[in-house]
Amino acid sequence: MKIIVYSLMLLLLMFAVVVCIGDEQVQNREQQIKAAFLYNFVMFTEWPADKLAEPNTITIGLLGEHPFGNTFDPIKNKTVKNKQLNIKNFGMFRKSFPQDNAGKLEFANYIEQLRKCHVLFICDSEHENYKAIIDAVKGYGVLTVGETEDFLGFGGIITFIPGTEKPVFDINLDACEHEGLKISSKVLRLARKVIDYDTPDAVNKNK
Amino acid sequence: MHTIKSAGKIAIFIVAILLPLGTLCFAEQSEANAPQDLFAMPIEDLAEQPYTVYGASRYEQKTSEAPAFVTIITADEIRKYGYKTLADVLESVPEFFITYDRNYSYIGVRGFRRPGDYDTRILILINGHRVNDNIYDSVSTGTTFPVDIDLIEKVEVIRGPGSSLYGSNAFLAVVNVITKDAKTLNGVEVSGEVASFDTMKERISYGKNFDESHNLLVSATSYKSDGPTLHFKEFDTPATHNGNVSNDDDKFYNLFCTATAGDFTFLATYLPREKGVPTAPYGTVFGDSRTRTNDDMAIVGLEYKHDFTDDFALRGRVSYHHYNYDGAFVYDDSGLYVNKDNARGRWWESELQFIAKPIENHKLTWGIEDRYNTTQDQKNWDSAVYLDDHRHSNDWGVYIQDEWKIFDKWTFVGGVRHDEYETFGGTTNPRLALIYQHSDATTLKLLYGQAFRAPNVYELYYNDGDSTMKAADSLNPETIQTYEAVLEQKLNKNLGATVSAFHYEMKDVLDQYLDPSDNLLVFRNLKEVKANGITGALTGRWENGAKGRASYTFVEARDGETDAILVDSPKHLAKFNVIYPVIQNNLFAGLEVLYTSRAKTLTDNYANDFWITNLTLTYENIVKGLELSASVYNLFDVHYGYPGGAEHRQDIIEQDGTSFRIKLTYRF
């Protein structure tokens, strides 16, 4: 009997402590892990000097109906590579703009913002726009990250494989080199597959 | 080590380990009010983070949402702590303790283990296929476990009653073992180890990913150990070699294959083991190396998983199981003779499961499961046949569970399963859980569950020609009701804490009874057991790659009638595990310290409490793909023993002193 009383007291006490700590939104574990990976990709990728020359921020862009919520809050405004980390939420990819001059300007500006990203996460909800998005940022040193199997086929650089129990991702080394990016071997080593079309077979990598 | 009182040791443990960790948490708490430990985690560890946990609800879900207190041990920990068997893994898990009688390893959970019982109250799954055999209900987790430890990717331990989903045996806990596949073991891996007592183990594995949805893994293992020379004081007479024996040999091999093709996953594993029995159980001749047991288990299974839409999924499983037990026991009854004891089990398991979200905020899981026992035979003979019992049977169950997100933070889980057995009829077992997810850092779970275990054919029909044991013929299932409260709290970006308080009551516990009318042992629905306990556990991960866990469990399990503390029920368990990177990304030290308090034996004596320390050093990538590990088990050569079963003359069975292992693994 005593042990029950003590247990309940301990539980209540811990609960009281917990309630005081404060409120945070319930988030999806998978999205949290992916968010942490995006952060790691920033840390373990080298961009060409001109891509880092400009203002003092390093940007992770998010495209699509992503359920990240406030997942990124803990690293907002953090300093990475001597730059301030900036999380930019683009929402759903905008395909149509007014056909007037103002519209054209708006479109140019929109694409410019995408091209300025260092890492661009493209949700599976943008599946039908993969080609448009990737073509738009091609040649601007953007590390594109997707979450469907076929993402690399469109020229994406890294993709998380859906339906796995823990994070599994493939890397398209060709696309990566084409963008002038250097991904650390630390990341390459963790990839399930590193695709290099210069060599005939897909090189399977393991942990 | 034995002279200090156990209470004193507990106090030392708490002060030495838990408190410094505790102060660390609270010191850092103020600055880290959003405990997002994932961002701080080394990328290698991040890659090991499970999105979900499978076993608690029969579908994949987040650990914090699982309606149970869950622990997950990964392959990385298995390597870096130098675990040799699944029993070693489970011994490090909060609320679990093990016993080894120098033939089989047995698991105790939450203060409950009955000497002489074959782990019938824990359900073990391999990739979702249930493994407990159809004669003794057992899955021994020592060297008989049907998958080589090196092929285990992770072990999910789900405490509490699981009968509302899994039926029989999911009584105290469900342990789901997930094996490696070509996604985690790609290429060729060869591994060799040598250890104390002339022990050698070799393994070769080959994994290939053909494309995204087609892969194959095959593996073969061979293990042999001569075992130490043992001394048993109970046999210390000149006629019995002064109590010294050397027939503790152990030998197994394992063939394993898993393959995936689209929605189908195939599993096949076969592990035959042969063991010398050095303890002279059942009054056999001491030191005769012909007294030995053979256990071989094989599973061939196929799983089908298909998600038709985001809101509707189908899972199907079918498997064929084979279990053979062959025991040879040498007796001296005016001349030596060998008594043979056999069991033959063959059975099919099949299951169909549906997961659907028919309306918003509800997730329904329902299914049907069948076990068709084609063979459940037991035989005992020497010059005469004492037992030749042939059985077959069919058991089935249906279940449904609803996970209802009542509000944003409140989830209710309600499930019920009905099982039908040919032997005793039907039983229905519910589970209710209320989960309050206060924040990403804080989860409170209130759990209630009922579970059962069906009497097995060994308990029902085994007799040895009515010389010591007679058949029961009719028994009822035993039942358990468990109430539990679990609080999970992230303390800061590095540490998480769990507190679990539980109360359970068992009824109609199956136990052996000596019938005074004929002086024969027989199984009866006898006992009642009541237990209360509490566990505090901490898990930690640090930026430099260090990780660890510490836990303390207090439990009082008493006989419902006499109020006496149960036999083999240690009141205090303390566990401390840490992996520390001595050289970043290369050299890791895995330290394990386990405390088990004294446990009552069958003769009302006590097996002393003990502290065991194990240390493993692992050097990864000496050259690319090459790994070397060196382990010392029972570092301080502590003398300790476990309570023996009634078949042993030894009241306490002594365990090994310090032993060593060196292991080399190369992957290319």
Image (spheres, grey):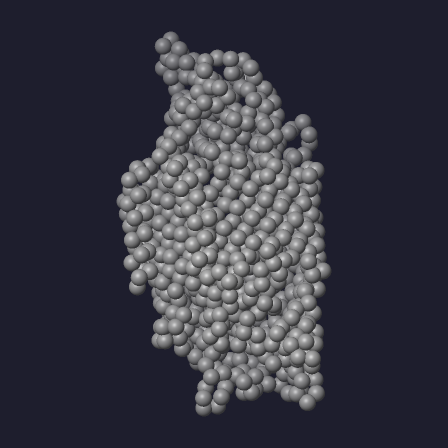
**Image vertical order of residue A183 relative to residue B196, above or below:** above
Residue under the point 69% across and 44% down: B666
The quarter of the rendered structure image containing the C terminus of chain B is top right
Residue projecting furthest to the front? B3
Residue B563: x and y in percent read: 36, 73
Residue B343: x and y in percent read: 59, 74
* Between B268 and A188, the one nearer to me in the picture: A188
Residue under the point 66% across and 54% down: B660
* Between B371 and B557, the one nearer to me in the picture: B557
Residue B142: x and y in percent read: 58, 62
**Image vertical order of residue A28 relative to residue B301, above or below:** above
**Image vertical order of residue A40 relative to residue B502, above or below:** above
Q: How many discs appear?
A: 0
On the image, which quarter does residue B302 sit in?
Answer: bottom right
Residue B222: x and y in percent read: 69, 58
On the image, which quarter does residue B126 sit in?
Answer: bottom right
Residue under the point 65% across and 35% down: A203
Give left or right: position of B521 versus B388: left
Answer yes or no: is residue B273 visible: yes
Give left or right: position of B521 versus B485: right
Give left or right: position of B84 versus A93: right
Answer yes or no: is residue A149 visible: no
**Image vertical order of residue B55 relative to residue B599, above or below:** above
Residue projecting furthest to the top? A101
On the image, which quarter does residue B368 sit in?
Answer: bottom left
Residue under the point 63% across and 53% down: B632
